Amino acid sequence: MDSRRSFLKSSATLVAAGILTPVAPALAATARFEADGSQFLLDGKPFQILAGEMHYPRIPRACWRDRMRKLKAMGLNTLTTYVFWNAHEPTPGHYNFSDNLDIAAYIRMAQEEGLWVNLRPGPYVCAEWDGGGFPAWLLPTPDIQPRSTDPRYFKPVQTWLKRLGQELTPLLIDKGGPIILTQVENEYGAFGKDQNYLAQQMKALRAAGFAGMLYTADPAEYFANGSIPGLVGGINFGTMAKAEKEFADRAKVRPTGPYFCSELWGGWFDSFGRIHETMPTQPLIDSLKWMLEHKYSISFYMLHGGTSFGFTAGANWNKDGYQPQISSYDYDALLDEAGRPTPKYLAVQALFKAYLPADTFAPMPEPEKAISLPRFRLTQGAALDQLLPAPVTSTSPQTLEALGQNNGLVLYRHTSKTAAEGKLRFGDVRDYAIVGVNGRALGALDRRYRETGMDVSVKAGDRLDILVDTMGHCNYGANIGKDQKGLIGDAKLGDAALTGWDHFSLPLDNVSKLAFSTGPSTGPAFYRATFTLAETGYTFLDMRGWGKGHVWINGHNLGRYWSVGPQQALFVPASWLKTGENEVIVLDLHPGADRSLAASPKQIWDLPGSGL
């Protein structure tokens, strides 16, 4: 049975069961935003969505308006954004919609700037974001099945969507707001094909108050699995694909419109230890030209990627194993990480000017100020041990999720009762572990290389420490929801089980109480300095010469750095700096000699032939 016949059969089954209606139920005749068999309609007139995706947590709030104006200056009329569940509900029932997470303010600002909004509420978002947006507390054990009707998963989803609806449903177009589209799930066809689950997900959105037009988005090859009868079906594809072929593949399942490239990947994301990803401009222009000529709707992924600050970067798992993503979400996008127009942006803008009226294009905002910092030393240190809390004790090593911790570090400690030597082994190490005995480091275990053990020798009374640094929870593929962090399974030394473990949680959510001194620091430690600014501006902190860790500027966690590259500098927003004295704190898990920093307006990438 071909994909179209399979799609139609599943549609008929769901309609007969009363799960779906032949036409999306909330699209009343009075709806302002509708669709017919070929196009979108706004107030009864043909409307071509020309959108750019930008994520509010990845852009400092002070820069939201600037980025929106650059979106309009390119000729676009719609802002696309995901919603990041784990950012808003870090612990069950405790919600955060303030400051940089005030998504309602973000959407209202888009309306002020004359933009429509394409909302992607997930709850799964992928997005190279930690866990694909799923809170770590939602999936404490691998037996819970995400993206299914498993009640352990789906009931929290329903609760979350209702809470999100309180924030955002007043901003739907038929209530006077700018939200014209709301996505159901996200690229589900690449994960599964349970039409009952998709129907229940749609019902959950409706129950949360998301009236108006719903749609799905999938790569064309998975369109039959992930689209829903009666809803608009977008397709996602990248720079090197040909738009004509992608829409032809979609037409094998659904020949009717409206025709919507819901993600046009203008670049790609980066993983630690690999060369920076870039994509050529001309194939992108070729696909754009074809879609513009056919008046198809388009959403750029990403127009501007920004930065995955703190612990928010995700990870992939595929045939090459675990691939943690870097803090920069530059994405080789049309606007770079600092929000500056790239040659790719200018090329797309020039193409649009050949197809769109001159009054489509808003003025380009004035460039933001950039600053540099001359190199300075971090002369104060503080041992990581200062942050150790009272331990949690158990027979075998516990995951972070079992300890009620979402991200950060955990120190596992075992005191040997007898002398022993051999291979120290764990079921898995997630994601990077420094192994030591009595404070002396023996080596590291790196999940990227599937390392789960090393030779160790201990005497009776020796203290065996394993400091685990967690990276992103997997955000794509079969490992979603099965990437619990820390030491996994039982521990063995040789053939003997190691039982009796102390767990010290280090979430790194507050480093303000560290007591620094000018004496030398050994082992994993924090380093501190202050610097004075006469004026503020954005900059990139040069991390070359450091090992692996995190950086805080005036209390803001800039994200992860790691000498393996390809990112060698961390973005510092202007709004996180101040005139006068500023503080920088660096955690380095590795030993090093030159504890110094500098900054400039440029990101530093490991590139082919760079020698880095």
Image (cartoon, grey):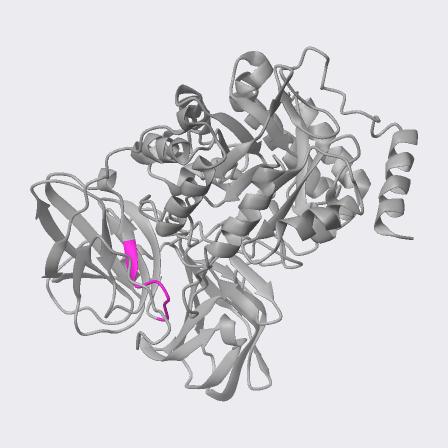
Viewer-proximal residue among 377 and 536: 536
- Residue 128 in the image, given as x and y percentages of width and height: 51, 52
Viewer-proximal residue among 528 and 574: 574
**Residue 240 shown left or right of residue 551 in the figure:** right
Count of numbered circles in the view: 0
Q: Is residue 121 above or below residue 407?
A: above
Quadrant holding the C terminus: bottom left
**Can residue 566 be found in the magenta stretch?**
yes
Q: Residue at x 17, y 67 (%)?
A: 595
- Residue 40 in the image, given as x and y percentages of width and height: 65, 26
**Can residue 177 be found in the magenta stretch?**
no
**Residue 592 shown left or right of residue 468 in the figure:** left
Asked if one can make out residue 152 in the rendered structure from this viewpoint, the answer is yes
Q: Is residue 160 above or below residue 504?
A: above
Viewer-proximal residue among 522 and 607: 607
Asked if one can make out residue 122 in the rendered structure from this viewpoint, the answer is no
| Extreme residue in the top direction | 30
The magenta region covers 564-570
